Image (cartoon, grey):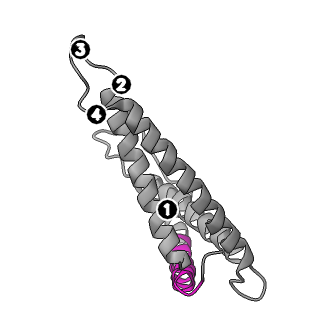
Amino acid sequence: MKLAEALIARADYQKRIEQLKKRISQNVKTQEGEQPSEDPNALLSELDGILKELTVLVKRINQTNCSVQFDDTRTLSDALAERDQIWEKRLILSRVADEASIRNDRYSRSEIKFVSTVDVAAIQKQVDQLSKEFREMDTKIQGLNWTIDLV
């Protein structure tokens, strides 16, 4: 199995877990004298099995990420951490730029005037650069995922 296939399977397990949680929640209580539409104990048993399978898969994905070289100095795990940090910083700066750009129209001179305390254009340039870095790194990671065999 390729790493990319394992990642797809992980996402499927996570979706199934969310669906099971919802189904369990809908069936743990019924009106007195009524029967639930599904047996919550059977659903809990199914959930337990999926969680165990997911745990094994995640361990294998993590082992693979730690053992594969991304480039000369970083493992795939290192690259994933850096990519996530780039995305997080991009989100924060994007929010700062959005909040600093909001104009509050005043209807009279007596209303409070708000001014931006940051250079929105400079922050937006940083957001654009981080977006580019993220795309490039993510593309390389995604390509690598289809060539790596899962440990």
Q: Which mark is residue 31?
A: 3
Q: Secondary structure at mark 2?
A: loop
Where does residue 108 sit, x and y in percent of width and height? 30, 38
Tell me how far mark 4 sits from mark 3, CA to CA.
Answer: 14 Å
Q: Which mark is residue 28?
A: 2
Residue under label 4, please give it: 38
Q: Amino acid at mark 4?
A: Glu
Point out the stretch of residues depicted in magenta.
Answer: 125-148
Q: Residues within 10 Å of mark 3 (few under 14, many from 20)?
A: few
Q: Is residue 40 visible?
A: yes
Mark nearer the N terminus (1 vs 4): 1
Q: Amino acid at mark 1?
A: Arg
Q: Compared with residue 21, is residue 149 higher up or lower down, i.e. above or below? A: below
Q: Secondary structure at mark 4?
A: loop
Q: Which mark is residue 10?
A: 1
Where does residue 107 sit, x and y in percent of width and height? 27, 40
Q: Residue at x 54, y 80 (%)?
A: 2
Q: Is residue 146 or residue 51 the one in the foreground?
A: 51
Tell me how far mark 3 sits from mark 1, CA to CA.
Answer: 36 Å
Image depth: mark 4 or mark 2 in front: 4
Where does residue 116 sit, x and y in percent of width and height? 50, 54
